[in-house]
Amino acid sequence: MTGRLEYRTVELANTVELVLVGLLRDYGPAQASLPVEPGETVLDLIRELGLNPDLVAIVMVNGRQQFKSHHLQPGDRVKLLPMVGGG
Amino acid sequence: MLNGYGGRVLRVNLTQGRVEKSELDPDLARDYLGGRGFAASVLYSELEKGIDPLGEANKLIVAAGPISGLLIPGAGKTTFAAMSPATGGYADSNVGGLFSAEMKYAGYDLIIVEGVSPEPVYIYIDDDTVELRDAEDYWGKGAITAETALKKQLGDDFQIAVIGPGGENLVKFACICHDFGRQAGRAGVGTVMGSKKLKAIAIRGSKSIPVADVDEFRRVGREMYDYCKASDAWDVWVRLGTAGVNVPSNEWGSFPTRNFQSGHFDDMDKMTGEYMREQIVVTDKACFACPCACGKYSYSKKWDVHVEGPEYETAAFLGADVAIRDIEDVAYANYLCDELGIDTISAGNAIAFATECFEKGIIGVQDTDGLALSFGDSEAVFELIKRIASREGIGDVLAEGVRHAAQVFGGGSSHFAMEIKGLEISGYDSRNAPAMMLAYMTADIGAHHNRAWAITYDIQVGRDAITPDKAAKVIELQHIRPLIDCLGGCRLQWVELGMPLDYYVPAMKSITGIDRSWEDLMLAAERVWNLTRAFWVREMEGFGREWDYPPPRWYTDPVQSGPTEGKFVTKENVDKLLDMYYEQRGWTENGIPTREKLDQLGLDFVTI
Amino acid sequence: MHLRADSSKCTGCRLCQLACSLYHFQENNPKKSCLAIDPKFPDPGVFEVRTCTQCGECAEVCPVEAIIQNEKGAYYIDSEECIACLECVDVCPENVVFTHPDQEAPFECNLCGECVHFCAYGALYVE
């Protein structure tokens, strides 16, 4: 029993909170808690979702813009935005 | 009293020193809405064919729209328009800030400036009082310096539109500056102001703007505002502004690099919107009635200057396109352009062009008074900006724009003079985005992205596709985005925050009292689009398809590096895109609006 | 309790003034609003917001006692009683008693709170 609880706690901690904005919701969940491997990049996460990386314009991790090569940590809040209309 | 409008047209003749006020024609308001619509209508009907854009017969149009001055998110745009001294064709350029709101409070929807003043003047407007005042104390001053001085003299509650030395010296891409860092930048509207010896327009108003249904208007405005505030994208755009696009554009391979030799800049660590925020941004600065302030007002310790920006286009042209890799240096170049009053897009594009010519040996130190040019040399960029504004040496050539500079430099440089119709291409290399390339080719002031931005569409349906839906998309965007220009608004609440365009329908109804559907509004936009096309047809001998072609680099030179390496759009596909576009627009195979199309839009007075 | 501002969050958008005018006067005219935005440009490049602190000095100085408090405790000028001497305008330490050519009497913040709703940046609050 204790073993399973421990396992569940560890599992929940190794997640990132993901928000997809705008038209990206046509291609994935609007909000989700997703497991993350150590050293995983934002690009890895995008690919796992089956999203075309080109459709993801702006990447925010914990409120700061990052490159897609940014390495994720458990507990990160990730927001992915498309750019529909440009400048 | 016309609901939603200031109600008056102000006509100022600088040759005669005469001021005339008249009532705004309700038919003009009904058919052309305002803003860019008014500009197109006045320029087409009042300008004779063949005038000199720098002479007495050109007119500078300043236009507000029906939402200007009202509680509608993004109601902060003012349109400046004229026949362009850069292209010879139609030009309008809009600027954020507070000017059009103040016009409405003073009771004006439209200001038409005619003639040429014998001495430098500024137009002073305080509600019903309109005067031409001596601008001797301000002529020669930088735009930021002059705005500061004018506000100090007249009061902080005056809104100022002002040119810098660039406009005074008739640099072909001089801009009209407003609110300490915003510009009507493109196609030389500032040049026209300079040619009229008009240093500034200072305006203050105190009147209320009437709307048809105050309760309904309050409800709609509140809903639009609430939508914007609740948007998931809100915090991102406020944090980064348009500089947030630096990174994605680079990842798409559309960030113009080294005069569009590539679409990817290899050193972005100090060029991101995030780095900029942390390094130099001081204040989030909004335009009138905007809940998503994109203005990133900054202070650079390194250069000891304040500047609004750099925003995306400036990061592209005074950054990647000239291979400067530190946004703080871009900020200084931005400040120089803002104070001198020249467009950062055209200036950077022209400097990049000169640099490529220099690196290829087409020009040398004998042409640059000893200044060596190389990509990445920021000091050379700063120096060239100053020489362009003062028209010194090579600056005098570049001040004419890249099309002219290529003719002067020779050596086959027209191949990579990145302009369409004489206007320098703005910040998206489109060799792997055919819909975007089509947007640039068919924009009605020359190559500018504000009419249609289609890169995401290219990505969604497949970049390589050359299909009729891409032309359809460009056409649709060319109605939507300029519609917002007619209303006096900013498109970024829709573009960045996802605010539904539908809101403009009840907004316009509650403001004007006229019941218009979305299709009615789109029809007005299509009307204006065909009118500006007709302006070009009338002005340019033999105007047609050839004028829509992009520079040869775009259909011959593969992208040199990055994610779009090797890509370009073939000439065959350029023609195919135009074929599909003209057909869907109801134009001839040569790109001329047909009689049928013109009549359908109520443009029976257009005889081209 | 009064309207307060954190000027460091102000972006100069004027939505507060637009909302004030629309709700206080049912008009579209930020020149008829009850708070002030002072831009400080080009240097240091910030906006300063002035709001009514409900100090009551206007009420004290009014020679005809035309300035009273509403149900929220906010001072307001009864335009029927006002003789437009403008002493209240002069005495206000924040310069937030306003006049306008259209209005016979000066006007000031009645604590309706609409501006707070329309400040997207959270610069305004009532406390």
Image: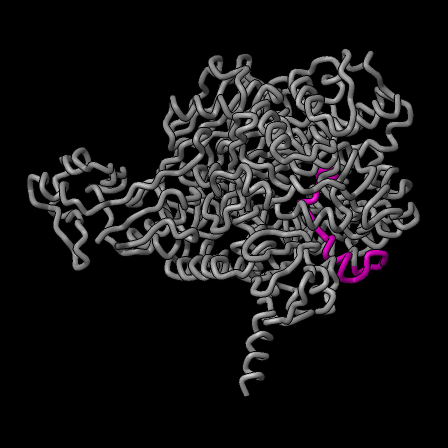
Residue C57 appearing in the image: yes
- Which portion, as a residue range, is magenta? B444-469
Q: Is residue B347 above or below residue B250?
A: above
Would you say C114 lies left or right of B5 here? Answer: left
Residue B13: in magenta span? no
Would you say B73 lies left or right of C47 here? Answer: right
Residue B451: in magenta span? yes
For the stretch drawn in magenta, what is the main secondary structure? loop
Residue B128 appearing in the image: no
Q: Is residue A19 above or below residue B405?
A: below
Name the residue rendered at 76%, 35% in the picture. Answer: B538
Q: How is the image coloured?
A: one colour
User: Extreme right residue here?
Assistant: B572
Q: Nearer the viewer, residue B143 or B60?
A: B143
Q: Nearer the viewer, residue B530 or B417?
A: B417
The x, y position of residue B511, in whole percent, is 45, 54
Q: Nearer the viewer, residue B245 or B93?
A: B245
Name the residue rendered at 75%, 48% in the picture. Answer: B439
User: Extreme bottom residue here?
Assistant: A1
Name the residue rendered at 55%, 15% in the picture. Answer: B140
Quarter the C terminus of chain B occupies: top right
Would you say C21 lies left or right of B487 here? Answer: left
Q: Is residue B514 above or below residue C45?
A: below
The x, y position of residue B339, in whole percent, is 56, 24
Task: Quadrant for residue A76, please give it.
Answer: bottom right
The x, y position of residue B412, in whole percent, is 91, 27
* Numbered marks: total: 0
The x, y position of residue B523, in whole percent, is 65, 55
